[in-house]
Amino acid sequence: MPFIGQSPLTGAYHVLDAITASATATYNLQLNSGAFSPATANQLIVSLNGVIQKPGSSFTVSGSTITFSSALTSSDNIDFIMALGDFLNVGTPTDGTVSTAKIANSAVTDAKIAGMAASKLTGALPAISGAALTGINSVAGTCSFTVDKNGDQTISQNTWTKLTFNTEETDPDSCFNTTTYEFTAPANGQYYFHGKCQINNLTSQNDYIYIRFYVNDAQPSGDATESVTGGYATSAHNRQFITVSGVLNLSANDEVSLYAYTTAGTRTIASQSSCFSGFRLV
């Protein structure tokens, strides 16, 4: 590698050319008859009359000139001046040059991993140890829930009424709220839902009941998530069962609930045969 000026003595130690003391404090430093310019006074070991001198106070350097704190005499003896080699500054390694073997065990700390972008996590997952996984609510197949009713519920005629599913059977990701009777989507995606109800007290073959999924307490466009049934078999069996299933495209924090509607008067949604369930598809 080319240098401007004197090449650094990286990792090397050199005894400089001998200097004869005289009635002056200033002398020229030479190595192999060429001018030598140390980086600092600390790079030199100077022995004067058998005593090692302290850099900075006993002597200083400027370029290739050494200056003692006071003028010497011809009777003084500069025993030797040794130049210590420079430290090698390796700088920043070139990309892709540091191998795994060069990284000390446990040198990559949690703090370094914490800032890693999700885009860096590619490839197949290793075998899972069995420890609990966290932060996976946005993964397909999660957010499953099944809820039912603790007690019957009456609904009024010609009014869409939210059904009060207040008992959880399964909800491992805590996505369903039994106070507001709503499922909250943890992330954007497509979700599958299923609802089932039993309606009692039907009095006519013209009694109809509808159920459908609501998103954010409003009917989504279209009728793909609505179901209707009506009438009853005999007066001795004045009840009907109705189910609805469908896929909803949701945004994060959308809330889904099940509503019912009847064309008859006040009717009862039975607790024992009514339920609401769902899970994320993609």
Image: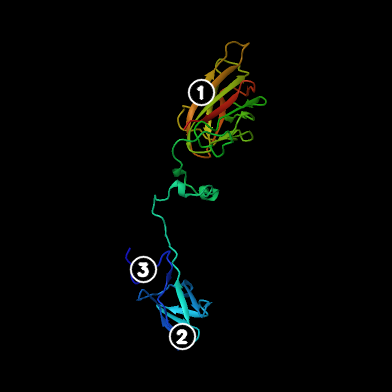
Residue 225 in view here: no
Q: In which quarter of the image is residue 19?
A: bottom left
Task: Relative to 234, say whether 196 is above or below.
Answer: below
Residue 71 relative to residue 196: left or right: left
Callout in the foreground (1, 3): 3
Q: Which amino acid does label 2 sit on?
A: Ala
Q: Name which residue type carries label 3.
A: Ser
Q: Mark 1 points at which residue?
A: 227
In the displayed structure, 270 sits above or below 70; it is: above
For the residue pair 236 and 50, the one nearer the viewer reads as 50
Q: Callout 1: 10 Å neighbours few (<14), some, many (20+)?
A: some
Residue 6 falls in which quadrant of the image? bottom left
- The amino acid beneath tag 1 is Ser
Above or below, comparing residue 256 to residue 3 in the picture: above
Q: Which of marks 3 and 2 is nearer the N terminus?
A: 3
Q: Please state the total of marks drawn on the protein image.
A: 3
Within 10 Å of disc 3 (Cα), the crowding (few <14, some 14-19, many 20+) is few
Q: First in sequence, mark 1 or 2: give its number.
A: 2
Residue beneath label 2, please? Answer: 25
Where residue 189 appears, as percent x and y from the top left, is 47, 35
Q: Position of residue 198 (x, y in %)?
A: 60, 20
Query: Residue beneath label 3, please?
Result: 7
Q: Residue furthest left?
A: 2
Using the image, determine if residue 142 lies above or below residue 69. Answer: above
